[in-house]
Amino acid sequence: MAALLLTGFEPFGSFATNPSWDALVRAREIGLLANLDAQLALIPVTYDGAFAALQRAVDTHRPRVAVSFGLHGGLSGREADMIYLETTARNRDGAQKADNAGITRPEQPIEPGAPATAACTLAVPALLSALQAAGFRASASDNAGAYLCNHLFFRGARAFQGQIAYGFVHVPPVKSMGGILDLDALARAMGIIAQVVSASGT
Ligand code: PCA
């Protein structure tokens, strides 16, 4: 049993690295997760593999809370230094770009017959205040796109409903990729998120 599971994605598309994973590893390296009983899992950017990897990690570690992180690079309308707490997963695929296995999904429901949305069950207001109090720009979002981030979020939110608290956070590109935050700053933000969800149980 672990208190907390944190996941990040592998690189995809034109990105050589993915800070949603790199900053988690960095957070662990510099001790920001030390007292939290947290486990990390790397998620592939494939429609076939993403949720399977998350489910495997949940089965292995049996966390009380899980948070998945993804990179919002390439999503339209996203601000370069903003951390987005995704409140609402949508029951549809349909991004134009292929996944890392070369698969492009037409616009179609992820789970036919299921409701159009599924909610994040983390304490979003508490997370926003904690991040903002530490000087980060953070905002709630109700649209995680139509690619792997939304896909994983929807499938996780459906599968873990009533069992473990689960939510999704979109992080910005880091400095080395032309962004504004450096990797250590993003690692600190992830450390804050981990602290808050551990403390609140959600
Ligand atoms: N971001 C993509 C998928 C993987 C990631 O880190 C997205 O926003 O869907």
Image (spheres, helix red, strand yellow):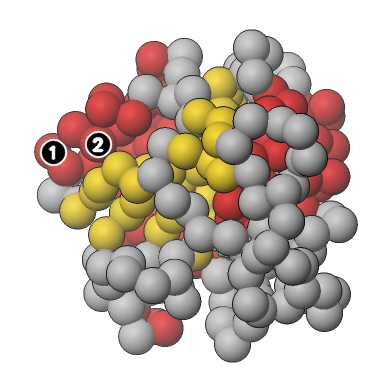
- Disc 1 vs disc 2: which is toward the camera? 2
x then y, percent, for residue 25: 56, 55
Provide residue 173's location: percent of width, then percent of height: 40, 72
| The CB of the residue at mark 2 lies under 8 Å from ligand 1 | no
Q: Name the amino acid type tagged 2.
A: Leu
At 74% from the left and 47% from the top, the residue drawn is 110
Q: Which mark is residue 128?
A: 2
Quadrant in which the N terminus appears: top right
The dot on residue 116 is: none
User: SS class of the residue under badge 1?
Assistant: helix
Q: Could you tell me which residue is drawn at 67 percent across and 58 percent down?
A: 93
Q: Look at the numbered disc 2 and give the secondary structure of its residue.
A: helix
Position above or below: 8 against 85? below
The residue indicated by pointer 1 is 133
Q: Quadrant of residue 75?
A: bottom left
Taking the image as drawn, is residue 42 in sight? no
